Image (cartoon, rainbow, N blue to C red):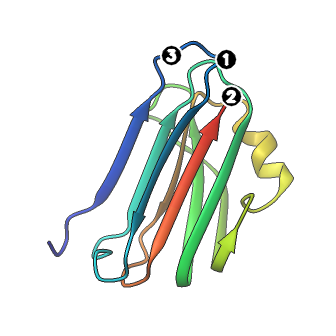
Amino acid sequence: MAGVRNIVSISAVTAPSTPATASQSLTAIQNTAGLTVTLDAGGRPDKTFFASVGGAATVTVEGSVDGSNWRILSTTVMIGALDIFPDDLTIHRMRGYRHVRAKTATVGVAVTFEISAI
């Protein structure tokens, strides 16, 4: 469906010692409106992020204390896969936010986002 934004939101309602993960993948054909993946980490301060794209894409990581007001933590143009995105400073910044999301408005490329917290 052209123009439909792909959004995934996972709320972590389990105990903070239990890991929480939000992830989604789109093929280049499926990616007609970009992708946003959001994780409510609850009380889990330690977060990791994995991203993979099938071509050049601008990827933004944001944090929010309330799930409504978002702050940009990092924006990177990437090609391929990064195990931890994109640097230790961004991972450190994610610790202060209950809600973390990754997004790209780039269309026509395969994309995978995964955010985990423990």
Res. 17 mark? 1
Q: Mark 3 and 1 residues: CB-CB less than 8 Å, in contact?
A: no
Q: Earlier in the sequence, mark 2 or mark 3?
A: 3
Q: Earlier in the sequence, mark 2 or mark 1?
A: 1
Instruction: Estimate the x, y position of residue 2 in percent, counting from the top left.
Output: 17, 75
Q: Could you give the CA–CA distance between mark 2 and mark 3, rounded to whole angstroms? A: 11 Å
The residue that disc 2 covers is 118
Considering every residue shown, the one lying at the far top of the view is 15
Residue type at mark 1: give it.
Answer: Ser
The residue that disc 3 covers is 14
Residue 46 falls in image quadrant: top right
Considering every residue shown, the one lying at the far right of the view is 88
Tell me the residue at 66%/73% (across/down).
81
Instruction: Estimate the x, y position of residue 107 in percent, counting from the top left.
Output: 37, 79
Closer-to-camera residue (62/107):
107
Is residue 32 toward the left or the right of residue 84 in the image?
left
Closer-to-camera residue (54/62):
54
Q: Could you give the CA–CA distance between mark 2 and mark 1, rounded to whole angstroms? A: 6 Å
Residue type at mark 2: give it.
Answer: Ile
Q: Mark 2 and 1 residues: CB-CB less than 8 Å, in contact?
A: yes
